[in-house]
Amino acid sequence: TVTSTWCAPSFGTEAGRWCEVHGTRSSVRVYHRDSDPLHVATAAGGWQATPLASADDPMGHIAFFGAAFAALRSGDALPVTMSDARRNLAIIEAAREATAARKAVEVGK
C-alpha cells in the first residue's frame, strides 16, 4: 500500500529535486541529478543510499533502452520481465493516485 508521496526542491548538498514514496512496508527517496539518487528508509529512521546498476550514467534510460533493443535483436531475454514492468508501473500509478487523493492507495496487481 502506498500511503503518501511528495516532491520538493532540494537544498544543501543535493543537486536537484527529490521525491519520497511511503508505503506500509518501507519508504524510498529519489534524488534527481544526485550522485546517490536512490535512498531507502532504515529501521533506525534514517535514509541509506542504495547503489544503482548505472548510477554514473546521467542518461540512464539510454543504457536501459540499449539493453532492451540488443536483447530484442539477439532473441535474448529482456532486462526486465513484463511482470516486473507492470508492477513498476502499478507502483508509479499508486504513488500518483495517493498524491492526488491525499490518501493511502493499494498498489494494483
Image: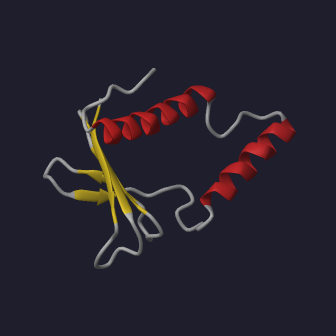
Q: Would residue 8 be visible to someone looking at this image? A: yes
Residue 60 location, x and y as percent?
Answer: 61, 59
Spot the residue most to the bottom.
12
Which residue is at 34% across, 68% downward?
9
| In the rendered image, the vertical position of residue 71 relative to residue 38, given as above or below | above
Q: Would residue 39 be visible to someone looking at this image? A: no
- Left or right of 59 in this view: 7: left
Image quarter of the N terminus: top left
Residue 88 location, x and y as percent?
Answer: 50, 36
Residue 10 location, x and y as percent?
Answer: 33, 71
Q: Indicate the quadrant where residue 85 lies.
A: top right
Image quarter of the C terminus: top left
Which residue is at 45% across, 35% downward?
93
Residue 51 location, x and y as percent?
Answer: 44, 58
Spot the residue most to the top.
109
Which residue is at 62% across, 28% downward?
82
| In the rendered image, the vertical position of residue 52 relative to residue 43, given as above or below | below
Q: Indicate the quadrant where residue 94 lies.
A: top left
Which residue is at 41% across, 75% downward?
15
- Left or right of 84 in this view: 35: left
- Left or right of 20 in this view: 31: right
Spot the residue most to the front.
101
- All told, the count of numbered labels is 0
What's the coloring here? Answer: secondary structure
